[in-house]
Structure formats: C-alpha cells, structure tokens
Image (spheres, coloured by chain):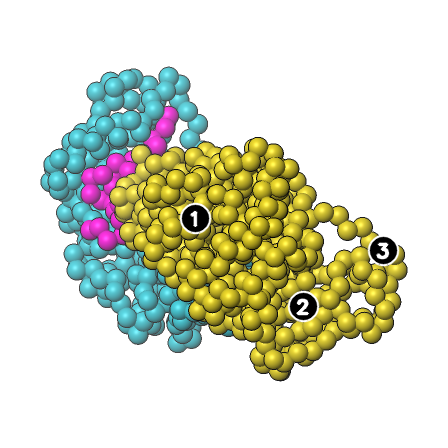
Chain colours: A cyan, B yellow
Amino acid sequence: MSPKTRQRLPVAELIAKKRDGGALTEDELTKLIEGFMDGSVTDYQMSAFAMAVFFRGMSFEETVAMTLAMRDSGKVIDLSGVSAPKVDKHSTGGVGDKVSICLVPMVAACGVAVPMMCGRGLGHTGGTLDKLEAIPGFRIDLSVAEFRAQMRKLGCALIGQTEALAPADKRLYALRDVTGTVESVPLITSSILSKKLAEGIDALVLDVKVGRGAFMKTEADAKELASSLVRVGRLAGIGVSALLTDMSAPIGFTVGNALETAEALELLQGEGPEDLRELTYALGAEMLRAAGIAKSKGAAERMLTSVVKDGSAARKMEAFVHAQGGDARVVQEPDRLKLARHRVTVTAAAEGFVGEIDALEVGYASMGLGAGRTRAEDAVDPGAGIRLHVRLGDRVQIGQALATLYSSTKALLGPATERTAASFAILKRRPNTPSRIIETIRR
Amino acid sequence: MSPKTRQRLPVAELIAKKRDGGALTEDELTKLIEGFMDGSVTDYQMSAFAMAVFFRGMSFEETVAMTLAMRDSGKVIDLSGVSAPKVDKHSTGGVGDKVSICLVPMVAACGVAVPMMCGRGLGHTGGTLDKLEAIPGFRIDLSVAEFRAQMRKLGCALIGQTEALAPADKRLYALRDVTGTVESVPLITSSILSKKLAEGIDALVLDVKVGRGAFMKTEADAKELASSLVRVGRLAGIGVSALLTDMSAPIGFTVGNALETAEALELLQGEGPEDLRELTYALGAEMLRAAGIAKSKGAAERMLTSVVKDGSAARKMEAFVHAQGGDARVVQEPDRLKLARHRVTVTAAAEGFVGEIDALEVGYASMGLGAGRTRAEDAVDPGAGIRLHVRLGDRVQIGQALATLYSSTKALLGPATERTAASFAILKRRPNTPSRIIETIRR
C-alpha cells in the first residue's frame, strides 16, 4: 500500500496508470473529466494526462467513456420536438471547404433535420462560421433556446461552439493547443464526438480529409481517425459513417470567406465547380442514407438534384439566412457579397499543365491576406482571399492568370503573391485528376 | 512556415519537438526554465513537457543545460571565503539512512568543508532535517548569510531547501509529484544536481540506493541514474562520483528521527552498527578522495578513524549542533533524545535465521507510527519509530524480540506491529549477508 495521495481522486496515479500503458475504467475517466470541470483535477494534471495519451493511446472503450463524460460536462440539446431524423456533417478541416454552406439547405430541403455546431478558421484552414458571417447581418451566437426553436421551425440551424455544450472539450482543446497534445487520435475523436453528441443528433457523417491541406497528411492516418470516429460514435449510441476525401488541392476555385460563400451559393443554383458538387452530393447522399430517407446513393443523389432544380434548396437557404439575421438576397445574388478592394493577379511563369495546387500553401497565403487567423482572438477580413482561375489538369500558357488575390490591406498582397505562385506546379504532361472521394467507411 | 505562435517563446513547438524525439538546444532549455519562472511558460505546459521527457528522455547535453538553468533560477552560494575544498554528499533516499549525521562532522574534522542542503522525509523514506530536529532547539532555517558565516567558521552547515536556491527545481518537483512524472532519470538528475550546484561545491559524492527500500528497485536502474548524475555533474563543472549501495534492509538498528540521530551519534564515539559504519566510512573516504585530501581509500579511512578516536569528530558535531541552536549535550549523551512513550515489542513466530527485513515495509510501518509523512505538510513525531533487535543472518528463537515500536499515539501501534512483523522473513538456513557497497562509479 502506497502512501495516501493528497486528493480524493488519485489523479497522479491515474496519470501514471495511463503513462505505463494501462487502461482507465469508465468510472475513472468520468471522474477525471468531472474533476477537470470542478477544479480538483488541475490544468497541469490534465495536460500531463493528454501527453501520456499521446504516447499510449486509448482503447475504444476508454475513448467512448471520455467522449460521453465530455458530452455530459454541459447541456445535451433536447431535439425531441423535431420529428425528422437529425443528422449532422463534420469536416476535419480543409482549404476552400465551403461544403456545409450548400449542403445544409439541400439536405434540409429533403426532409432531414440538420443541427450544426461549427468552428472558426485557425491557421491554414477556414471555418464555416467565418464564411457565413461574410453575409451582412448573419449571426451565429444563437442561444440554445433559439437554436431549438429554429430547428423546429426550419429543420436547420447553425451555431458557434458555446460554453453550454461540451465545455470540457473547449477547455481541454485550449490546453492541448498549447501543450503539443493535439495530434492524438483518441483525443481528436472524443473532442469531435463530444460536441456532436451534445447536439442531440441521431447520426453523423464525417468528411475526414487527407493530404497536404488536411490535418491528416497520409491516408493511413486519416483512415485510422475515420475508423476511430465511426467505431466510437456507434459505441456512444449514434450512427456514424465517414468519407475519406482528398485535400491536396483547394476545393473549388475559391479560398476566403465571402469568396467561398458566394461559390457555395452558386451550387444551389445548379452551378458551381465540379469537385465541390461531387463532394457535396456524396456527403449529402450519405446523410440521406443515414437518415433512412434514401435507400441508395443513386436515389439520394436524385433527391438532392431535384431540390436544387425545383428551387426548394435555395428557398431553404433564404429562410435559414433570414432566420439568423442575414441578408437573404445573397442567395439569389451571390455577387452582393463584398470582396476586398486591393487585388493582384498571379500568372504562369511556364507553359504546361497544372499538376499541383498546394492547398496548405494556398491556405497560408489566404490567411496572410487577412482571410484567416494566426491566433484564435484575431479578426478576419471577410472580403480577403484567393480566386483560382485554373484547376488541376488545365493547360496553361506563360503569362496566363492562375489566381487573383484579394485583401483590404495592400501591404499583405506582396508576400501572399509569392506564396500563391509557389503553390502551383506546372508539369510537361497532363496529370491524372482522380475523384476527391477516396473511400467510404461505415464500420 | 507555420503560423506564428501566440508567445514569444514557441513553447508548444518546443514540447512537440521533445515529444517527437528531438533534442532541445541549450538556449531553448534555458528559455524554457526562465519562462517557467517568469510565468510565460505555464504549469500545464511544463507538466506536458515533463511527460514528453518521461517518454523520450534527454541527452546528457540537454540534461546539463536544464540543470544549469534550474541552478541559475536562484542564488548560487558564494563560498569563495572558505578556503578548504567543498564537498557534499547526497543520498537518493532510504530507510534508516542516518549517514549524513555522523558523516558531516567526521569529514569536516578531516578538513573538508561540507555545505549541505537537506530534505524532509516523505512516504517511506526519512529525511535528515527531521532527524536533526529531534535534537532540542536545532534549527535548519538558516538564511543564506548565516549559512555562509557558519561555513567559514566551522566548515560545515546544514540547511533545508530554501526558495533562494534553485527555486525552479522546487516548483518543477511539486508539479512532477502530482502529474506522474517523477520517474525520469534526466529529470531526477537535473533536480538533484541543480540544488547541489547552487551550494557552491567543488565535488559531490552520491549514495545511489538500490532495492526494496530505495527509489530505484533494480541495480540496472540505479546504475543508470548514478551514471547520469556522474556524467552530467562533471559536464556541469564539478567532480562527481557515486556509490551504489544496497537498500533492501534498513540501515543500522533504528528507523525514526530521535532513534536514528542517537544511533548516528554513537558512531562518533566509535560505537554503532557495523553496516552504518561501513557505509559512513566508504562515503567519507570518497569525499576525502574527491577533496584531494587523501590519496587512497585506506589513507582516507585511517584519517576518519583517527578523528573519531581523538574526539575531534565529536567536538565538531558539538560545535555544529550548538551553532544551529541545538542542545550539544546530546553528542556525548545520545540518550537525552526523547523517545515516544507508547511501545510494543514484535517477537519471532518461528525459529531460524533472519533472512530479510523488508526496508520498504519497515519504512511504511515507521511512517504509520508517526515518524514520517504521507503529505508534505504533515508534522512528524520525533520520538516515534522502530528499533530492531536483530540483523540479517542472526539466529532467532520463537518468542524472541525482533523489534520495539515507539509512538506518541497508542492507536498507531496496532497496524504498525502487524506491518513490522510481516517485514521479517525467517529462513531455515543462514543467508549470505554481503556488503552494502555494490559498486563505485566515477565516470
């Protein structure tokens, strides 16, 4: 028997157990998170625990217990008043990823309820909240009561991460961000799922991105995360499936908030770039399947095509933007979204085929123009960003425009120009341009 | 180029570098410790760093840089006014380890200056401070100025860990204690050496204990720590050597503060147990050798024998106790040290030879009698403890007294009796009783 520890919960012993490769029980993990919230488990103990998890991992059972404990650190939204099946989508983050903006109204128009909690952009990746805030008046700080009321009325609503939902995740993520403990599959899994479970959903479709512009750089890593999310989500009681999708080049032609929102809105008019369309329809089809509304991918895609064609997706978007205080005219007239006034064009220095557009570099270049954040407390320039004029596989001539850069701060154009130019690889031979959808993971 | 971090020192990146197996530069480690002291590196970052070091280790160069940075977080005592060579001894902690009490005056009487910073007991191990405080009036809270003055006058002084010396170590150790990051050789090395280097010593002799009652349970682990201490200490600019010594059974016949101080004082009269004598003389000889005062172990042991015989070691002890406010009469009359009034005797339940006296169990039993601490803020019972009546290899009869337990709280005797009885193994055949000195490590 070792000497008694100084706290009711033997925190140092739990940390040492994980450090030495042991598995914590459901009860231990629940108490750890409860203690983290009530202050009896300190930040320095939690960060040491996170580092031990980085090295030792967690079993699926441990990850489920931690996920549920973090979910239960706050409210779980009661959406029992919404009769439609409730399905959300989550992306692990990319460059030019405006899928949610067109996906939510399309899926909602098909009769699926979509309660979505979104994040802001940080580093090279953008955030859906920032993109929608490019719409004049759009507000994301709904209270939980407003969120529920809008869900009942419209079948879709979008909210920023709030202290009310999964606050343990918010606190833990803030710690992980500054202690080198972000890159851990079980910690990422419990972070994503605890928030999503608090939304009161029946099912979740994940877009796990892989490649230069994604958090996961290799297919093996992305697949490991996707499998963890699917398995832990199901053990936690909801349906979860994941699409592994390619994030080497930016999605569509735009990166930046107003630019991306406008491009996503074009999709609701039956226009927009092919890769964005492919991604949106594939994720939408998976959501309809998860909701039990469509039996096959083909049937689901036909439903999605139909709500775009008959204008019901665009009308849903108008109602949604209006309900959250935004100027709904942008849905029919995306050009109303104001772009930054300082602009510069990047041109091709060689002749050939566009073989690569490095999403990570384009993401950083866009951040450098003011469209993103280096720190969570930074403000963003809604009109800043990059519009690409070419896509992978296109033939280009010397001097041809590759991209236009936008910024409200002229001095930011110079460095971003260089970075954007360097992100293109012009090849002698036409490269393959495979589908963005790599794999669907359902178990 | 990754996004700019939110602090001048990119702490999260330094942690991630160590986490991924990289080596930090001298400059990075210095800034990390400086930041820890000025608050720009938070406790939660430091504990995550410590956990990363637990898994990834540190090179000797890194450990040196961290040691020196922790030393420089506070004062380094200037003992240039003391002309004698300055040598300290440090034990990694054991049960019944009262060596310092007799060693300091013996070595000082030989002309070596001994500036000693000591700790208190915690858990099953005792602390020299607690033992000396069993002497009425003895105080250990000298100021740095008093410490220096006494060093100049007497050539020996003893002080508790103070905020003035290596405060970064004190803060880091407090964190490690509650975050499962104690058991790391480079962190233990830098913790021990940063404090010792702050004493302004020329050389250090280490008693690295191994076995049931020690922090290091195996010879391989103890040897790794000893080698790290010797190598890092030398790179940091002082002479360091280490004795690997056996800590399976308690040292001498006593465990507990007054009991141990009395036993150590007997050694100054040329009496006392053989194993305590062997350890004290071996460590003392190594100190004289490190000080350049004796050329061989034989010559050194003759000097130590001589200062005991001619009474100069005892006189040095009297002056030392007197200087620190204690009743110096205890040196000639150790029986003046008051023992606790409630007592019970543990007797042999079988006939045979004493094959094992489990130091860890005896240590916990003594702690349970009030002689030690479960928490750093606990007070100790100076008169509590255990007096053994037999040693390893002794033949015993059924009913023969094995140990007497002392406590000021009668209710504590019961559980400690059981624990003490269980710590003895009585064998059919006489066991080997090898020397406590396993190995000397000088490089």
Label 3 neighbour load within 10 Å: few <14, some 14-19, many 20+: some
Alpha carbon distance from label 2 to label 3: 22 Å
- Type of residue at label 1? Gly
Label 2 neighbour load within 10 Å: few <14, some 14-19, many 20+: many
The x, y position of residue B201, in whole percent, is 43, 42
Q: At numbered mark 2, what does the secondary structure look like: helix, strand or loop?
A: strand
Q: At numbered mark 1, what does the secondary structure look like: helix, strand or loop?
A: loop
Residue picked out by circle 1: B155
Which numbered disc covers residue B430?
3
Which chain is mark 3 on?
B
Residue picked out by circle 2: B387
Does residue B5 belong to the magenta stretch? no
Residue shown at the point (26%, 30%) measured from the top left = A419
Q: Nearer the viewer, mark 2 or mark 3?
A: 2
The x, y position of residue B334, in whole percent, is 58, 66
Dividing the picture into quadrants, the one containing residue A74 is bottom left
Q: Which tag, 1 or 2, sits closer to the chain's start?
A: 1
Which numbered disc covers residue B276?
none
Do tags 2 and 3 sit on the same chain? yes
* In the depicted structure, whether residue B343 falls above or below residue B81: below
Residue shown at the point (32%, 48%) measured from the top left = B75
Given the current orientation, which residue lies at the most extreme bottom position? B411
Residue shown at the point (54%, 62%) measured from the top left = B331
Which chain is mark 2 on?
B
* In the depicted structure, whether residue B346 falls above or below residue A101: below
Please tell me which residue lies in front, B274 or A70. Answer: B274
